[in-house]
Amino acid sequence: MFGLDINVVAIIALVAVAAAAVCYGLLFSRMEVEKKADSRLNRVKSAETDLNKVKDARDRVQELSKRRKSMQDSIKDLEKKQEEKNRKMGDGSLKSKLAQTGLSLTMGRFYMFSVLFGVFVFLVTLIAGLPLLAAVGAAFVSALGLPRWIVGFLVKRRQKKFLEEFPNALDVMVRSIKSGLPLNDSMRLIASDGQEPVKTEFRRVIESQQVGLSIPEACTRMMLTMPLPEVNFFAIVITIQGQAGGNLSEAIGNLSKVLRERKKMKAKVQALSMEAKASAVIIGALPFIVSLLVYLTSPQYISIIFTDPRGHLILLASGVWMSIGIFVMRNMINFDI
């Protein structure tokens, strides 16, 4: 009886296994089809998700490209307007040059000093025994040329001092803005505690705001007394920030870095071109040195070139060719950055 039960159980188990195997065999293909269908459906869903992500990314890139293009167009428009304003402001007249020196010198005083200096040179040359025509020529050159050269020298010296201190002033503005001060107060801080001539220029900006001008307009007017590309960059940055917004401290900080890099590049170019400048000075001075040495050793040999009319023509032609050579060498060793 016990053995019969075991046989029955074994038979039932075998029948169940066989039935399960038959069912699996019959349903295996359908299960694989459903599994593949689910896999394809998941891939399609993930592909749709990826396509949506790609589309969103493409839309973001296109939006950034449009914003960048609009920003570039606005910068170009601002540069064109700024150049037009600079042409109107920096007319290169003597009045604007006198304003750029930082001195309280009017046109009347300048002409009065020029005339007095010309009269002084005229009297000195007459006392020295020069002919009347030569004295008049020396007085004319002294009255017109030398004062203007002095004004140009003062302007360049003041601009050089401004460029040395301007990046430091921008760094002070960056730290002030990061600490919570508005732009107007940071400019006022430089106008009160800065170094000359940056202090004077920012004081004029503050005074322009007090009479009703906006900050971008007041910064643009700085080109009247300091017509430099660096000042133009600063005015453009302030104008763009006023129109488009953004992180002002970061923009001014980047401008400070650019100005420092420009200064380093100018120093590097000056060092690299120093050999060429020395060669140009030696070549330009060589004819005069040789003439002086010949005159000191053999004055009768070279004096004929000053007394004979043909010598005058030779001197004139030599002066023309020397001027052309100096002009060519000057253009070869001067670089704009």
Image: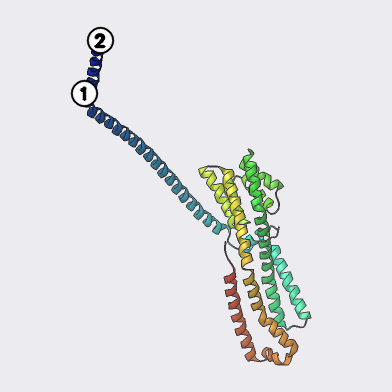
Residue 270: % across, % down = 63, 65
Which residue is farthest right? Answer: 127
What kind of element bears circle 1? helix
Picture coordinates of residue 281, whole percent (x, y): 65, 75
Which residue is situated farthest in the top direction here? 1
- Residue closer to the observer: 165 or 153: 165
On the rendered structure, is 29 left or right of 122? left
Residue 22, numbered label: 1
Q: In the rendered structure, which disc, 2 or 1, sits on the residue that comes first in sequence? A: 2
Which class describes the residues within 10 Å of circle 1: few (<14), some (14-19), or many (20+)? few
Residue at 63% of width from left, 85% of height from top? 315
In this orientation, which residue lies closer to the viewer: 73 or 52? 52
Q: Is the residue 245 above or below the residue 282 in the image?
A: above
Query: Of the residues tagged 2 and 1, which is closer to the observer?
Result: 2
Q: Residues within 10 Å of mark 2 (few under 14, many from 20)?
A: few
Looking at the picture, the colour scheme in use is rainbow
Which residue is label 2 attached to? 5
Quadrant location, the N terminus? top left
Tell me if residue 88 comes above or below residue 8 in the rendering: below
Give the percent coordinates (x, y) of residue 32: 26, 30
Q: Is residue 113 positioned above or below 20 on the image?
A: below
Q: Secondary structure at mark 2?
A: helix
Q: Position of residue 305 (x, y in %)?
A: 67, 90
